[in-house]
């Protein structure tokens, strides 16, 4: 009989604006269940922005924040992105990806 693997940990990835990275990372460090935390400077495109059509594709600076959390912290991480990283502009940190570890 195959044993069912119970999900205990997730890896998250959030693409946020550089000016929000330090505040976001400090808040993450206060969460119980945070195993690892990484921040990396990246550049990305915002394809849906209406003002880019005449200028071509532009790559904007972002910070990729990723880490390993307990599954019980999933909603807390999404809430932190929603409250600390959203600015109301395109590409402002609305994306959070979660995958099982």
Image (cartoon, rainbow, N blue to C red):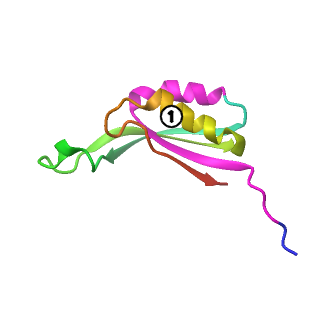
Q: Does 21 appear in magenta?
A: yes
Q: How many marks?
A: 1
* Residue beneath the point at 84% across and 67% down: 3
Say above or below: 47 vs 23: below
Q: Which residues are drawn in magenta?
A: 4-30
The one of 63 and 1 positioned closer to us in this rendering? 1
Q: Does 97 appear in magenta?
A: no
Say which element carries label 1: helix
Quadrant assignment for the C terminus: bottom right
Q: Quadrant of residue 100?
A: bottom right
Q: Residue 68: where, in percent of width, then height?
A: 65, 44
* Residue beneath the point at 55% across and 29% down: 25
Q: Is residue 91 visible?
A: yes
Q: Residue 27: where, in percent of width, then height?
A: 58, 26
Say above or below: 87 vs 96: above
Q: Quadrant of residue 50?
A: top left
Q: Is residue 3 left or right of residue 22?
A: right
Q: What residue occupies the far right of the structure in this picture?
A: 1
Q: Is residue 65 left or right of residue 53?
A: right
Q: What residue occupies the far left of the structure in this picture?
A: 54
Q: Residue 4: where, in percent of width, then height?
A: 81, 65
Residue holding disc 1: 81
Q: Residues within 10 Å of mark 1 (few under 14, many from 20)?
A: many
* Residue beneath the point at 67% across and 30% down: 31
* Residue beneath the point at 42% across and 31% down: 86
Q: What residue occupies the far bottom of the structure in this picture?
A: 1
Q: Residue 79: where, in percent of width, then height?
A: 56, 34
Q: Is residue 9 left or right of residue 15?
A: right
Say above or below: 43 vs 82: below
The one of 21 and 85 positioned closer to us in this rendering? 85
Q: Is residue 38 left or right of residue 40?
A: right
């Amino acid at each position: 009989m195959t044993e069912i693997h119970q999900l205990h940990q997730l890896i998250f990835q959030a693409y946020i604006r550089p000016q929000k990275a330090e505040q976001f990372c400090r808040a993450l460090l206060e969460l119980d269940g945070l195993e690892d935390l990484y921040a990396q400077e990246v550049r990305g495109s915002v394809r849906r922005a209406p003002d880019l059509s005449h200028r071509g594709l532009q790559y904007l600076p972002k910070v990729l924040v990723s880490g390993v959390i307990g599954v019980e912290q999933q909603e807390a991480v999404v809430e932190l992105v929603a409250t600390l990283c959203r600015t109301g502009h395109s590409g402002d940190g609305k994306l959070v990806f979660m995958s099982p570890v």
